[in-house]
Amino acid sequence: MVTLRPSKPVAGSQILAYGAARGDLVVTNDDIAGPIDSSDEWIRRRTGIVTRKRASEGIHVIDLAEEASREAIEKSGLDASAIDAVIVSTISFEYQTPSAATLLAARLGIEDAVAYDISAACAGFCYAVGQADALVRSSAATNVLIVGAEKLSDLISPTDRSISFLLGDGAGAAIVSASDEPKIGPTIWGSDGENWDTIRMTHSLLEYRDNPELGFPTLEQDGRTVFRWAVWHTAEIVRSALDEAGLTVDDIDVFVPHQANLRIIDELAKQLKLPESVVIGRDIADTGNTSAASVPLAVHRLLEEGQAKSGDVCVQIGFGAGLAYACQIVVLP
């Protein structure tokens, strides 16, 4: 019987750097309130959003992903040739296949990389962190580029009152590499398929193909169900991630939940009884909800503005369509 030699495991992994790209357009609440019969005051009160960033017609998801990736690679100090895996989380890439990751690798000059996409919506970036951590620690990859990239403005109906006014465009990237000690904690992840259709497309591509009068499928959600689910479930997921990492809320320096709704963010902080010293990501106020890009964009902003610093312990959690969720504790680069 043949015995295969196992891969040599690595002690831990770390995030070396973040990169970011936001849409070039600033869209105010007044800009979108008319078609949904709403107002600036209503949107601010229910979501905390003042403006959101969206991308011009000629800017595509892959362009945003490339811009964010180039910044992350430059800040990491690595050459693009050192990257051997590329993971892109997106629900808004224009093609079912091939993957955005393979095209992104080519644009960046990364040859022969493992490259694939994740469809986990708002949980996607944290899913990617979990996968990159596993790839590095198992020696399946050395340096992994992970990206959450969305152009959600391509997938909205201007008259939809359930989700369209929340959404923005952007990309956040990070480089995950080996470390002498773990700087990415265990990922707590999963899904609640019983609520599969809570955030959904209006109809399928096949239905659109067979009945073009339906119009191109766009995003919609059951906002009340999503709000209740997020408020009642995500705090417990965070507590599980802290337990698995051997930490408590008193060890947290930075808290970055998915930028879905400011009311959800504030309620989570309250339920977790976070110390007042904890810095909380609230990028949603002028970026909007960018799905898979929201967590890295919020972290990037805190680092750039000096609200968070190298070595800080950061809890990041993504949750959304599926209902998929993922949470981990990371030491910031």
Image (cartoon, helix red, strand yellow):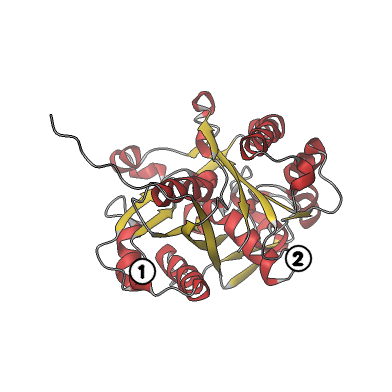
Residue 145 percent coordinates (x, y): 43, 61
Residue 57 percent coordinates (x, y): 46, 69
Q: Residue at x 68, y 56 (%)?
A: 34
Whether residue 234 appears in this view of the structure is yes
Q: Residue at x 41, y 52 (%)?
A: 136
Whether residue 93 appears in this view of the structure is no
Pick the quarter of the image with the C terminus: bottom right
Residue 277 percent coordinates (x, y): 84, 54
- Circle 1 packing at 10 Å, graded few (<14), some (14-19), many (20+), is some
Would you say the residues marked 2 and 1 are in contact, meaning their CB atoms lie under 8 Å apart?
Answer: no
| Secondary structure type for disc 2 | loop
Q: Residue at x 27, y 55 (%)?
A: 98
Query: 51 or 7, which lies in front?
Result: 7
Query: 27 or 262, which lies in front?
Result: 262
- Circle 2 packing at 10 Å, graded few (<14), some (14-19), many (20+), is few
Query: Which residue matches tag 2?
Result: 307
Left/right placement of residue 108 relative to residue 321 reads left
| Secondary structure type for disc 1 | helix
Q: Is residue 33 above or below residue 20?
A: above
Given the image, on which type of amino acid does mark 1 rest?
A: Ala
Which residue of the protein is positioned furthest toward the left in this rendering? 1
Pick the quarter of the image with the N terminus: top left
Question: Splitting the image into 4 quarters, where does residue 143 fall?
Answer: bottom left
Query: 315 or 295, which lies in front?
Result: 315
Question: Splitting the image into 4 quarters, where does residue 223 fall?
Answer: top right
Residue 312 percent coordinates (x, y): 70, 58
Nearest-to-viewer mark from 2 and 1: 1
Query: Which residue matches tag 1?
Result: 82
Mark 2 → mark 1, Cα distance in angstroms: 30 Å
Which residue of the protein is positioned furthest toward the top in this rendering? 194
- Ranked by sequence position, the earlier of labels 2 and 1 is 1
Given the image, on which type of amino acid does mark 2 rest?
A: Gln
